[in-house]
Image (cartoon, rainbow, N blue to C red):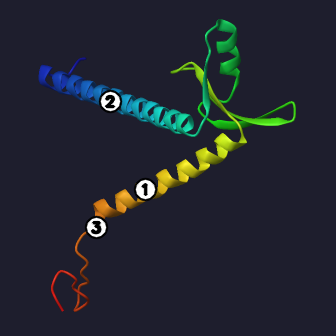
């Protein structure tokens, strides 16, 4: 590192370390967000009547890994439709449900989405006021 002073080397090293820490935190945040979403999905599936099936052997785990991961998919077995949510990395399980469980899942997911939208709208509520002589709801008429 000819031509660089110790101060320049220390600054460069500090910048590289800060970038590394930032990237590690960003990746950890993504993984945590993904895991949180999986846990929330599994709770919703269980509340809908899906049954959790553990991959309690190597052969079951291998079969589980062949399924689409963390996606609810329909499977037709012997003319009967089942819905499967596989998670081979965290819970090492699959959630399996029938048509009725899937319908309850859709209803609960919609209710949850509406509740989340209502919560966000309530958090963002401010006293209604329009500029330029518009309505002011924070004062009596």
For label 1, the crowd category at 10 Å Cα-Cα, with few meaning under 14, some 14 to 19 and many 20 or more, is few
Residue at 43% of width from left, 29% of height from top?
A: 31
Q: Locate residue 37, reporting x and y percent.
A: 47, 37
Q: Locate residue 49, reporting x and y percent.
A: 60, 36
Q: Residue furthest left?
A: 7
Q: Locate residue 96, reporting x and y percent.
A: 66, 30
Measured Cα–Cα span from mark 3 to mark 2? 32 Å
For label 3, the crowd category at 10 Å Cα-Cα, with few meaning under 14, some 14 to 19 and many 20 or more, is few
* Marks 3 and 1, the one that precedes in the sequence: 1
Q: Circle 2 — which element?
A: helix
Looking at the picture, tell me which residue is in the foreground, 29 or 56.
56
Q: Please, is residue 32 above or below residue 1 in the view?
A: below
Q: Are marks 3 and 1 in contact (CB under 8 Å)?
A: no
| Residue 4 appears anywhere in the view | no
Q: Which mark is in front, 1 or 2?
A: 1
Q: Residue furthest right?
A: 78
Q: Are marks 1 and 2 in contact (CB under 8 Å)?
A: no
Could you say which disc has been placed on residue 125 in the image? Answer: 3
Residue at 18% of width from left, 27% of height from top?
A: 11
Could you say which disc has been placed on residue 25 in the image? Answer: 2
Q: Circle 3 — which element?
A: loop
Residue at 62% of width from left, 36% of height from top?
A: 71
Q: Please, is residue 82 above or below residue 127 in the view?
A: above
Horizontal relation, residue 40 to residue 102: left or right: left
State which quarter of the image contains the N terminus: top left
The image quarter in which residue 51 lies: top right
Looking at the picture, tell me which residue is in the foreground, 1 or 93.
93
The image quarter in which residue 74 lies: top right
State which quarter of the image contains the C terminus: bottom left
């Amino acid at each position: 590192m000819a031509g660089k002073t110790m101060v320049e080397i220390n600054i460069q090293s500090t910048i590289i370390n800060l970038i590394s820490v930032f990237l590690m935190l960003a990746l950890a945040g993504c993984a945590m967000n993904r895991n949180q979403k999986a846990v929330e999905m599994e709770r919703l599936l269980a509340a809908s009547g899906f049954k959790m099936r553990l991959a309690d052997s190597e052969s079951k785990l291998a079969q589980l890994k062949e399924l689409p991961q963390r996606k609810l998919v329909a499977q037709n077995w012997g003319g009967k439709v089942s819905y499967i949510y596989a998670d081979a990395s965290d819970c090492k399980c699959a959630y399996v449900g029938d048509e009725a469980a899937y319908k309850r899942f859709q209803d609960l997911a919609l209710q949850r989405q509406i509740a989340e939208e209502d919560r966000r709208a309530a958090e963002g509520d401010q006293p209604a006021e329009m500029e330029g002589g518009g309505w002011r709801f924070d004062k009596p008429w």
